[in-house]
C-alpha cells in the first residue's frame, strides 16, 4: 500500500545526497584551482628573484669596473704630479742659478754706470746734480711752452665757439633797445631873476643863507656869476631838496628863516614823492613786480645819482631791458635777470650812509627785504669774476654794454689821464714788455714786446695775464681790449 509520508521522506533524502555530491565536487574544483594558482605565483616569484639577482650582479660588476677605472686614473694623475714636481724642482734650481747670474750682471752694470757717470761728468764738466738741474730747467721751459700753446689753443677754440652766439645775443639786445645816449649831470646851479636877489638870499648878517644851509645841509655859494647861485653837497637828494626849496622861495619872494624852514619841509615832501614815483615808474617800465615799498623808494633815489655823467636810474632800466633780452635769447631766467639788472646799482643809493662797495651793499639790502637769493647774488656778483649763476653773468654783461655805449658816460680830464696812466703801468710791470700804449680812449691797451724774450705763444699768455691784472687792480667802465704786438725784423745790405 502506498504511503505518502514515506514517499515524501524518500524524496527529501534523495535531494540532499545530490546537493552534497555537487558541493563536494565544487570544493575539489576550488582546491585544484587554488593549488594551480599557488604554483603559478611561486613560479613568477622565482622568476622575479632570478631577474633581480641577475640585475644586481650586473650592477655590481659595472660598479667594480668603474672603481677599477677610477683607480687607474688616480694612479696616472699621481704619476703626472710626480713628474711635474720633478720638473718644477729643476726649474726652481735653474731660476736660482739665473738670479745669481742676474745679480752679478746687475753689480757689473752698476759699476759700469758709475764709471760712465764719472766719465760723463768729466767730459761735460757738470756734476750729476748740475746736469739734473739743467734738465729740469729745460723741461720747465718746454712745459711752459706747452702750457702757453694750450692756453692759446683753448682761447681760440672758446672764442670761436662763443663769439657768434655772444655777438648775436648782444646785437639783438642793442637793436631792440632804443634809449638816449646824452649824458646827464646833476643840477647844481639855480637861476635867479636878478643879482639883487643875492642880497636877499644872504639876508641881514647872513641869517637867510645860514638858515637855508642848516635846514638842507647844502652849501649855498653866491659869487660873481651873473643871475645864478651854486648848490654844493655830496648828497644828491639834499641838493635836490635845496634846489626845490630855493626855487619856491624865489617864486614866493618872501625870504626869511621861518619861511625857509617851511619851504624846505615842503621841498622834502615833494622830493620824497618824486623819488617814490620815479621808483614806481622804473619798476613798471622794467616789468619787475613784487618789490617792497622800501626797495622801490631806494630805487627812486637813483634818479638823482650819476656815474661818469650817466643817470644811474636810467642806466638801471636800460640794463634791465638788455639783460632780459639776452636772457630770452640764451634760455636763462628772464625775471631774475631783469630784477637783478634793475637793482644792480641799488647800493649806490646808500653808499654815502654805509661803508663798502655798492654791489655788496645792494646784495645786503636785497636779502634784508626778502628778495630771492638768485637775484641778490646777481646784484652782489656783477663786479666780480666768480659768479654763481648765468643770470649774474648776463647782468654784468648788460651793465658793461650800457656803460660802454658811445656817449653814455663821460670822465673828467684828470681821471681820464690817470686811468690811461694806470693802464700803461699795469702792462709795463710784466717781463719782456718794451712799451705800452693806452689807445681808443682807454678801451684798448697796445703792448709792444721784445721778440727775443717773448715768443708767439708767450705773447698769448702775456695778454691773458695783463687782462687779469687790469681786472683785479683797476676800476673802469665797460671793457678793455689787450693787444700784444711782437715784431721781428731781419735786415741785410747788398754791397
Image (spheres, rainbow, N blue to C red):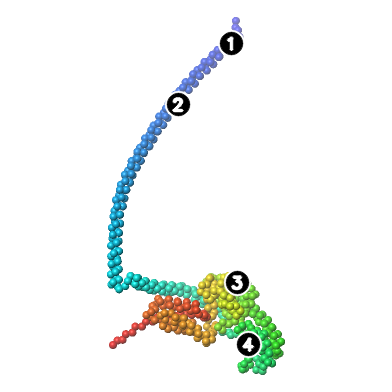
Q: Which residue is mark 4?
A: 219
Residue drawn at the location 45% of the way across and 84% of the way down: 437
Q: Could you tell me residue 336's position as x and y percent?
A: 57, 72
Q: Alpha-carbon neighbours of circle 4 within 10 Å: few (<14), some, or many (≥20)? A: some
Label 1–label 3 contact, CB within 8 A: no
Label 3: which residue? 367
Whole-angstrom CA distance, mark 3 to mark 2, is 109 Å
Q: Position of residue 79 (x, y in %)?
A: 31, 44
Q: Which residue is mark 1?
A: 9
**Picture quadrant of residue 232:** bottom right
Judge from the rendering whether residue 294 lies leftward or rightward of residue 27; answer left or right: right
Q: CA distance from mark 1 to mark 3?
A: 141 Å
| Camera sees residue 461 | yes
Gap in Å between the C-alphas at discs 1 and 2?
48 Å
In the depicted view, which residue is nearer to us: 431 or 12?
431
- How many labels were placed on the picture? 4
Question: Element under label 2?
Answer: helix
Q: Secondary structure at mark 3?
A: helix
The location of residue 284, given as percent across then percent down, is 62, 76
Q: Residue at x 67, y 88 (%)?
A: 210
Residue at image point 56% right, 72% down: 377
In the drawing, does residue 473 fall left or right of residue 105? right
Residue picked out by circle 2: 41
Amino acid at each position: 500500500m502506498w504511503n505518502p509520508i514515506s514517499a515524501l521522506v524518500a524524496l527529501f533524502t534523495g535531494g540532499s545526497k545530490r546537493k552534497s555530491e555537487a558541493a563536494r565536487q565544487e570544493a575539489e574544483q576550488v582546491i585544484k584551482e587554488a593549488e594551480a594558482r599557488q604554483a603559478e605565483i611561486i613560479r613568477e616569484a622565482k622568476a622575479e628573484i632570478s631577474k633581480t639577482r641577475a640585475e644586481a650582479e650586473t650592477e655590481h660588476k659595472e660598479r667594480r669596473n668603474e672603481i677599477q677605472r677610477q683607480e687607474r686614473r688616480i694612479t696616472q694623475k699621481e704619476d703626472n704630479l710626480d713628474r711635474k714636481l720633478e720638473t718644477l724642482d729643476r726649474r726652481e734650481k735653474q731660476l736660482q742659478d739665473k738670479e745669481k747670474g742676474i745679480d752679478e750682471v746687475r753689480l757689473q752694470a752698476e759699476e759700469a754706470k758709475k764709471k760712465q757717470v764719472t766719465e760723463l761728468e768729466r767730459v761735460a764738466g757738470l756734476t750729476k746734480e748740475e746736469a739734473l738741474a739743467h734738465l729740469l730747467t729745460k723741461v720747465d721751459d718746454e712745459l711752459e711752452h706747452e702750457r702757453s700753446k694750450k692756453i692759446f689753443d683753448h682761447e681760440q677754440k672758446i672764442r670761436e665757439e662763443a663769439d657768434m652766439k655772444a655777438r648775436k645775443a648782444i646785437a639783438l639786445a642793442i637793436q631792440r633797445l632804443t634809449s638816449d645816449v646824452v649824458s646827464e649831470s646833476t643840477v647844481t646851479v639855480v637861476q635867479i631873476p636878478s643879482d639883487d636877489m643875492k642880497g636877499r638870499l644872504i639876508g641881514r648878517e647872513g641869517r637867510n643863507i645860514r638858515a637855508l644851509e642848516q635846514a638842507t645841509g647844502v652849501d649855498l655859494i653866491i659869487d660873481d656869476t651873473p643871475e645864478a647861485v651854486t648848490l654844493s653837497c655830496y648828497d644828491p637828494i639834499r641838493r635836490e631838496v635845496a634846489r626845490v626849496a630855493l626855487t619856491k622861495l624865489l617864486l614866493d619872494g618872501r625870504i626869511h628863516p621861518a619861511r625857509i624852514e617851511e619851504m624846505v619841509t615842503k621841498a622834502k615832501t615833494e622830493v620824497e614823492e618824486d623819488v617814490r614815483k620815479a621808483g614806481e615808474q622804473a619798476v613798471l617800465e622794467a616789468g619787475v613786480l613784487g618789490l617792497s615799498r622800501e626797495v622801490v623808494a631806494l630805487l627812486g633815489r637813483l634818479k638823482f645819482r650819476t656815474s661818469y655823467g650817466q643817470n644811474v636810474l636810467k642806466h638801471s632800466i636800460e640794463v634791465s631791458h638788455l639783460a632780459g633780452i639776452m636772457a630770452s635769447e640764451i634760455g636763462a631766467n628772464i625775471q631774475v635777470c631783469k630784477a637783478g639788472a634793475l637793482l644792480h646799482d641799488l647800493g649806490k643809493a646808500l653808499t654815502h650812509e654805509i661803508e663798502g662797495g655798492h654791489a655788496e651793499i645792494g646784495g645786503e639790502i636785497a636779502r634784508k627785504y626778502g628778495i630771492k637769493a638768485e637775484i641778490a647774488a646777481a646784484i652782489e656778483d656783477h663786479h666780480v669774476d666768480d659768479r654763481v649763476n648765468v643770470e649774474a653773468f648776463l647782468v654784468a654783461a648788460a651793465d658793461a654794454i650800457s656803460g660802454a655805449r658811445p656817449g653814455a658816460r663821460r670822465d673828467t680830464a684828470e681821471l681820464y689821464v690817470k686811468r690811461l696812466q694806470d693802464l700803461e703801468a699795469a702792462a709795463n710791470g710784466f717781463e719782456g714788455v718794451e712799451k705800452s700804449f693806452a689807445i681808443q680812449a682807454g678801451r684798448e691797451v697796445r703792448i709792444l714786446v721784445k721778440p727775443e724774450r717773448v715768443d708767439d705763444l708767450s705773447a698769448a699768455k702775456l695778454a691773458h695775464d695783463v687782462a687779469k691784472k687790469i681786472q683785479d687792480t683797476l676800476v673802469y667802465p665797460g671793457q678793455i681790449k689787450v693787444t700784444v704786438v711782437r715784431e721781428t725784423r731781419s735786415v741785410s745790405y747788398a754791397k
